[in-house]
């Protein structure tokens, strides 16, 4: 278990994920994903998309990839949030290299508004900067107003629009970036 930092005020610790964490990451990821994106209920395309990313098999594959890193936030031994990023990820709107894509920053609803997401993002930025990244970028769904406001408040700049597509559905996103040096 790699411990990155502990904040005594919130009793939250941060560490790198291992393969043994896949089950809990999958459960938390599914919960947050459905709460965020299945706002009108669950239909087959959404169910397939969430399983594609958060099944035990899918997460085991993700955790084994050398370009993927997940940082976990735990409180009293319970997973409450995680950040997933990918090294070497480029985007046509981003001009700074090398860059890291923040693929997910998920906080369980009961723990939102407590600074855990902000702490987790800072841990991710520090870790990726130490490992040579000059910038971090992400895309956020336009319907997720809380996430859009969060990234702007954390110093990320909106650099343009993009689309996330699955099963013939297109979902508008905004791309955000931040220089790490």
Image (cartoon, rainbow, N blue to C red):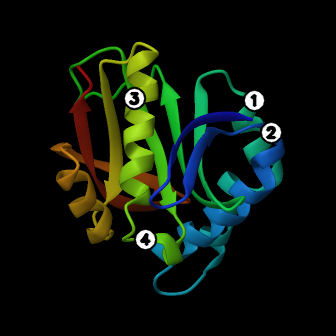
For disc 2, the marked residue is 19
- Closer to the chain start, of discs 3 and 1, is 1
Local SS, label 1: helix
Label 2 vs label 3, nearer the camera: 3
Residue where numbered disc 4 is placed? 112
| Residue visible at 77% across and 48% down in the picture | 21
Q: Position of residue 141 (x, y in %)?
A: 34, 60
Q: Give residue 17's position: percent from left, percent from top.
A: 69, 39
| Labels 3 and 4 touching (C-beta < 8 A) | no
Asked if marks 2 and 3 touch (Cβ < 8 Å), the reply is no
Which residue sits at x=50%, y=75%?
109
Residue 18, how many percent across, how many down? 75, 37
Residue 66 appears in the rendering: yes
Mark 2 or mark 3, which has the lower sequence index? Answer: 2
Residue that carries the numbered disc 1 in the rendered image? 64
Q: Residue at x 57, y 41 (%)?
A: 71
First in sequence: mark 2 or mark 4? 2
Residue matched to label 3: 126
Number of other residues with Cα within 10 Å of mark 2, as a class: few under 14, some 14 to 19, many 20 or more = some
Look at the image and tell me in which quarter the C terminus lies.
top left
Q: CA distance from mark 2 to mark 1?
A: 7 Å
Measure the C-alpha gap from mark 3 to mark 1: 22 Å
Q: Are marks 2 and 1 in contact (CB under 8 Å)?
A: yes
**Residues at marks 3 and 4, CA–CA distance in whole angstroms:** 21 Å
Mark 4 surroundings: few (<14), some (14-19) or many (≥20) residues within 10 A: some
Could you tell whether 96 is left or right of 125 in the image?
Answer: left
């Amino acid at each position: 278990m790699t411990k990155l930092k502990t904040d005594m005020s919130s009793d939250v610790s941060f560490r790198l994920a291992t393969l043994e964490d896949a089950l809990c990451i999958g459960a938390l990821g599914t919960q947050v994903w459905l709460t965020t994106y299945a706002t009108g209920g669950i239909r087959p395309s959404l169910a397939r998309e969430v399983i594609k990313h958060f099944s035990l098999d899918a997460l085991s594959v993700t955790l084994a990839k050398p370009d993927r890193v997940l940082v976990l936030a735990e409180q009293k031994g319970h997973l409450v949030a995680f950040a997933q990023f990918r090294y070497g990820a480029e985007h046509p709107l981003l001009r700074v290299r090398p860059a890291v894509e923040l693929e997910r920053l998920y906080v369980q609803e009961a723990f939102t508004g407590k600074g855990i997401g902000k702490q987790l993002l800072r841990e991710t930025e520090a870790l990726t900067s130490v490992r040579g990244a000059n910038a971090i970028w992400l895309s956020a769904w336009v319907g997720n107003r809380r996430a859009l406001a969060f990234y702007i408040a954390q110093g990320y700049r909106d650099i343009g629009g993009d689309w996330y597509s699955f099963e013939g559905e297109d979902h508008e996103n905004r791309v955000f970036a931040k220089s790490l040096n």
